[in-house]
Amino acid sequence: MAIIAPSILAADFNNLGKDLEMVNQSEADWFHLDIMDGVFVPNISYGMPVVEAMAKLTKKPLDVHLMIVDPDRYLSVFKNLGAEIITVHFEACTHLHRTVWAIKELGVKAGVALNPHTPVSVLEDILVDLDLVLIMSVNPGFGGQKFIENTYQKIKKLKEMASQMNTQIIIEIDGGVGLQNASLLIEAGANALVAGSSVFGSDSPTKTIAELKAI
Ligand code: DX5
Ligand code: ZN
């Protein structure tokens, strides 16, 4: 049974409160919040005032995925807004070890995200410090894109690395995830799934979440 994290990027922003309440009432585990700066990725999503408003309604952990350059500037801001997990991109951090420890010192779970072209081997010397690795299964920036099949072997390699190092990590997959590939992802070693359009675009988001949870 994996952690299911609906991505709010795919919610109806005209009825955000309603969609947040749906997630509260569902079997989902976390709220996945995608923060994009228009620099690290070619899109801008939503920022602090929106997260602050959301946090007043959300009753489950906020899993904050920062797709921004120089994330160190905003770690404490997101912690204060209620983040329980903060994930930064490997590709956006020159001093990743410093950034990871800055997150941990805030008392927040630390995650590192890898773009599709970044091999899991780059994490060899930081893996023991991490709570979570987010493997991007699409190029970050947009919801509703096609899942990249190479993801399966990255998950397997990462799982192998973690077991060799005797360290427990959450392996979270983000992009193009839905009922069609969830069981293969879990079989490969994923234990957290982000799902945006497959949840919010379905006839019954609550049922889709329950089905993902039941895998
Ligand atoms: C993409 C984001 C994802 C996105 C996933 O850059 O990191 O979290 O919302 O959306 P779907 O599930 O529609 O691919
Ligand atoms: Zn994301």
Image: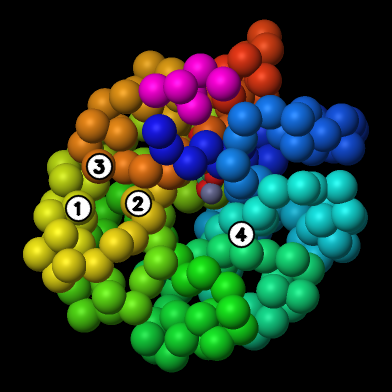
The three-letter amino acid code for the residue at tag 1 is Lys
Residue neighbourhood size for the residue with mark 2, other residues' Cα within 10 Å, grouped as few (<14), some (14–19), many (≥20): many
User: How far, Cα to Cα, is label 4 from label 2?
Assistant: 15 Å
Task: Count up the numbered dots.
Answer: 4
Of pointers 1 and 3, the one earlier in the residue sequence: 1
Of pointers 4 and 2, the one earlier in the residue sequence: 4
Question: Secondary structure under badge 1?
Answer: helix
Residue, disc 1 = 159
Quadrant that contains the C terminus: top left
The numbered dot on residue 189 is 3
Question: Secondary structure under badge 3?
Answer: loop
Q: Which residues are magenta?
A: 210-215
Residue, disc 2 = 171
Q: Are marks 2 and 3 in contact (CB under 8 Å)?
A: yes
Of pointers 3 and 4, the one earlier in the residue sequence: 4
Query: Is residue 52 positioned above or below 26 on the image?
Result: below
Q: Are marks 1 and 3 in contact (CB under 8 Å)?
A: yes
Q: Position of 107 compared to 140: left or right?
A: right
User: How far, Cα to Cα, is label 3 from label 4?
Assistant: 22 Å
